[in-house]
Image: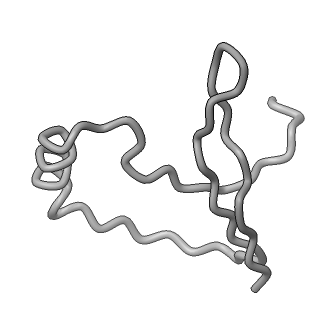
Amino acid sequence: KDKRPYHPHITLATRLRPHQFAEYSQALKDYHPQYAFKCSQISLFRLEEHGAGKRWVDVKQVNL
């Protein structure tokens, strides 16, 4: 069993070309998952160049 703390998150359409986004949107149009969980903070990340690679940088946090 993984001992790391779990942080629920949603990744929205990262690294998709416009036509890919349209295809996925169409394929998922009838998908309506029903989940509930408590959320105390929302974070917005941006993918930035970092040396020879890229990394996700936390640019904004909202405490709820």
The answer to which of 28 and 57 lies nearer the viewer is 57
In screen coordinates, is 19 left or right of 46?
left
In screen coordinates, is 54 left or right of 35?
right
In screen coordinates, is 24 left or right of 8?
left
The N terminus is located in which quarter?
Answer: top right
Image coordinates of residue 36 in percent, x first then y, are 57, 74
Q: Quadrant of residue 54?
A: top right
The answer to which of 36 and 9 lies nearer the viewer is 9
Residue that appears at 66% across and 40% down: 56
Total numbered labels placed on residues in the image: 0
Residue that appears at 19% across and 46% down: 24
Q: Quadrant of residue 2?
A: top right
Residue that appears at 16% across and 64% down: 30
Q: Is residue 41 above or below residue 46?
A: below
Residue that appears at 12% across and 41% down: 19
Image coordinates of residue 61 in percent, x first then y, are 75, 70
Furthest residue in direction bottom, as rendered: 64
Q: Is residue 14 above or below residue 40?
A: above
Image coordinates of residue 45 in percent, x first then y, are 63, 53
Identify the coloring.
one colour
Q: Is residue 42 above or below residue 24?
A: below
Furthest residue in direction top, as rendered: 52
The C terminus is located in which quarter?
Answer: bottom right
The answer to which of 33 and 15 lies nearer the viewer is 15
Q: Is residue 63 above or below residue 60?
A: below
In screen coordinates, is 6 left or right of 56?
right
Image coordinates of residue 63 in percent, x first then y, are 79, 81
